Image: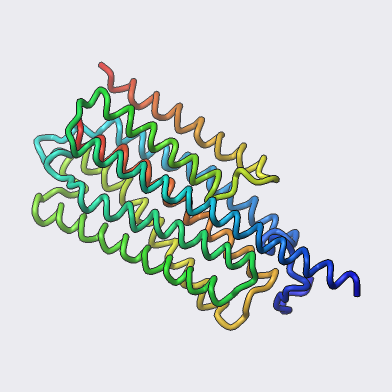
């Protein structure tokens, strides 16, 4: 019987933890919408491309970081393998990007 | 492994999607898949970056793109990412009905996104004569954005199949990993879209 009461306690603790987690996710979402709006406004305002392109790329990278670490839970324990796979993919993306941008340089 | 026993608060593990060995394998398998998907889209992005100015006298990105529709599509897909987070939140609290409700909202937002994309492509083809064969830019654009749209179609079919198949089963340790892997895939689609709206649309409007 003591076992039962303790599981119930864990459950209410668990529920509270999940709610706390959800609060963080909503903050993440609000920030992502905010960053998207900054990127679109910067382009709509017609600021010089030397400044706008690095800005929107940085905003995209931050958004994707939020998506991976919060929405896809990479910040939680036990995500070493997912991190290895995704960073491996990002490394390939970097190589492909550099290759294709430099191949048309001349 | 008790596949057909629904979960109740007393037997509920902390994360039902990773409580079984099968669930753990599905989780890892999906991340392997996403690593491969990253490489696939990397190649499309690289090709697009190289060919985006090769318009062969046809429409350029500045002629075609409009910010309003792309912003609407971004909001739709980003919100659908949040609603699938809600679905997984209710899964962890063992609330099957609310999970299904939020998954349904996710599906509707995904369909909205897809409708916008079909409208956009039809608009380019009919009003500008801009097709896959117009120029190297056209081929690279439709391959990249179209493949992403294809991923959305696949994701929607996956979600609807999952919801119909498990409608009467309730939540258990057998189907919880299935819902969780779908949610991860759906977030990844949004990750790709963030780079599409930045690299294709916003950078196409600027330069």
Q: In the rendered view, how is the structure colored?
A: rainbow
Evaluate whether residue B92 shows in this view.
yes
Evaluate whether residue B22 shows in this view.
no
Decide which of A97, A23 is in the foreground and name it.
A23
Q: Where in the figure is residue B150, as x and y percent of width and height?
A: 37, 57
Give me the residue at 45% from left, 41% from top: A64
The answer to which quarter of the image holds residue B7 is bottom right
The answer to which quarter of the image holds residue B199 is top left
Quadrant including the N terminus of chain A: bottom right
Residue that lies at the very extreme toward the top in this rendered image: A106
In the image, taking residue B70 as reference, residue A34 lies left or right, namely right
Is B96 drawn above or below residue A71 in the view shown?
Answer: below
Is A57 drawn above or below residue B124 in the view shown?
Answer: above
Q: Where in the figure is residue B65, as x and y percent of width and height?
A: 18, 45
Residue that lies at the very extreme toward the right in this rendered image: A1
Q: Where in the figure is residue B122, as x and y percent of width and height?
A: 17, 58
Residue that lies at the very extreme toward the bottom in this rendered image: B168
Quadrant including the C terminus of chain A: top left
Give me the residue at 62% from left, 52% from top: B29
Give me the residue at 19% from left, 32% from top: B54
In the image, taking residue B54 as reference, residue A38 lies left or right, namely right
Q: Where in the figure is residue B192, as x and y percent of width and height?
A: 41, 46
Decide which of B160, A41 is in the foreground and name it.
A41
In the image, taking residue A37 as reference, residue B19 lies left or right, namely right
């Amino acid at each position: 019987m003591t076992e039962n009461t303790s599981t119930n306690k864990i459950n209410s603790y668990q529920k509270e933890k999940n709610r706390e987690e959800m609060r963080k996710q909503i903050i993440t979402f609000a920030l992502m919408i905010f960053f998207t709006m900054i990127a679109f406004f910067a382009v709509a305002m017609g600021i010089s491309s030397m400044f706008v392109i690095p800005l929107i790329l940085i905003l995209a990278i931050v958004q994707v970081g939020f998506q991976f670490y919060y929405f896809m839970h990479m910040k939680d324990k036990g995500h070493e393998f997912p991190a290895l796979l995704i960073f491996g993919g990002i490394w390939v993306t970097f190589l492909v990007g550099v290759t294709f941008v430099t191949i048309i340089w001349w | 492994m008790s596949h057909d026993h629904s979960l109740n608060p007393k037997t509920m593990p902390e994360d039902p999607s990773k409580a079984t060995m099968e669930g753990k394998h599905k989780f890892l398998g999906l991340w392997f898949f996403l690593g491969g998907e990253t490489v696939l889209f990397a190649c499309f992005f690289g090709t697009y970056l190289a060919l985006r100015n090769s318009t062969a006298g046809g429409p350029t990105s500045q002629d075609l793109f409009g910010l309003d529709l792309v912003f609407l599509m971004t909001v739709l897909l980003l919100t659908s990412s949040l609603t699938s987070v809600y679905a997984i939140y209710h899964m962890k609290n063992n609330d099957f009905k609310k999970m299904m409700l939020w998954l349904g909202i996710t599906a509707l937002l995904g369909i909205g996104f897809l409708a916008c994309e079909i409208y956009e492509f039809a608009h380019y083809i009919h009003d500008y004569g801009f097709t896959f064969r117009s120029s190297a830019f056209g081929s690279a654009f439709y391959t990249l954005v179209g493949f992403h749209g294809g991923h959305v179609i696949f994701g929607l079919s996956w979600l609807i199949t999952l919801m119909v198949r498990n409608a009467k089963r309730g939540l258990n340790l057998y189907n919880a990993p299935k819902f969780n892997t779908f949610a991860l895939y759906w977030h990844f689609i949004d990750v790709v879209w963030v780079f599409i709206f930045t690299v294709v649309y916003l950078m196409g409007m600027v330069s």
